[in-house]
Amino acid sequence: MYTIKRFEDKIAAVTGGAKGIGKGCCLRFAAEGARVAVLDLAMSEAAEVAAECERLSGQPALALSCNVADPASVDAAFAAITEAWGGLHILVASAGIYTGQPLTEVPLKDWQRTIDIDLTGVFLCNQAVAATLMKQGGGSIINISSMAGKTSWPGSAQYSAAKSGVIGLTRSVAMELAPYKVNVNAVCPGNTLTEMVLGVAKEVGGRDGLSVEEWIALRAQDCPLKRFATVEEIAGVVAFLASPDAAFINGQAIEVDGGMVMS
C-alpha cells in the first residue's frame, strides 16, 4: 500500500489502538514497516488489530491490556514492550472517551472519568515513555487532543477541559524533552467517522430529535469541506509527525479539522 517505509526500524505504541483513530494509526505505522504495540482494554479487538499489523508490516506486533487511567497498568504495558523489543521510538496517546451534558447536569463522576482518561491518561503515558526516549536520545510523542481543545460548544465542559489540557501538557513535555531530541506534538482532529463519534451522534442527536444520519449530515455542514474526516486522514498526519520530515516541528497542536476552528 505504501511504497515508502519510513518506520521499518521503529517501534510504535498506540493507546486506544483497538478502535477509531488509534486503530488507524496502528495500521498506518504497520503499513510503513513499524513494529506496533496495540494498547487497549478491548483485548479481542486489540488482538485483531495486532494480527492485521503483522500482515501489513511483516513484523511482530503486540496486543497489550492497558487502562490509561491506572498508573500500574500503564507501567506494566510499557514494561512489556521494553521486555519484548528492548525499547520504543514512537508513542501515540490516543485513548479517550466523550461525555457531555449541560453544565448544570454534569455528574461529578463523568467529569472525573473524562479527565482521568482523556488528560491524566495522556500524562501517565507521556511520563512512562519519557525516560526511555531521553536515554536513547530521540523519539516522537503524538498526543491526540481535539478541535474541542481549541474551541468549544455548549454541553461539553469536561471534554473541552480535558482536550485543552492535553495541548498544555504537550507544550510542557515538548519543552522538557527537546534537549534529548524528542519531539512532542498534539493532533487536534475535527469530527471524524469513528465509533465514538457515532455514539455521540446517537446521544446528542437523540436529545435534539435527530437520527444518527441526520446529526452527522447536520454537523458536516459546520465544516468548510462539508464532511467528516476519515481515521486514515488523521493517521496520515500522525505518521508525518513521527517521521524525519517533521524533525523541526515541536510543541505544536495541529488542527486536522477541515477548517472548522478557522471558520
Image (spheres, helix red, strand yellow):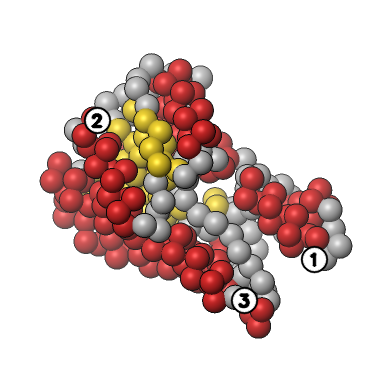
| Between discs 1 and 2, the one toward the N terminus | 2
Name the residue tied to disc 3: 106
Label 1 residue SS: helix
In terms of image quadrants, where is residue 262?
bottom right
The answer to whether residue 19 is visible is: yes
- How many dots with numbers? 3
Name the residue tied to disc 2: 84
The residues bearing labels 1 and 3 have C-alpha atoms spaced at a distance of 15 Å
Residue 178 image offset from top left, x and y in percent: 21, 55
Amino acid under label 2?
Answer: Ala
> Left or right: where does residue 83 sit relative to residue 190?
left
| Between discs 1 and 3, the one toward the N terminus | 3
Within 10 Å of disc 1 (Cα), the crowding (few <14, some 14-19, many 20+) is few
> Which sits in the foreground, 37 or 224?
37
Name the residue tied to disc 1: 207
Which residue occupies 80% across, 60% down? 206
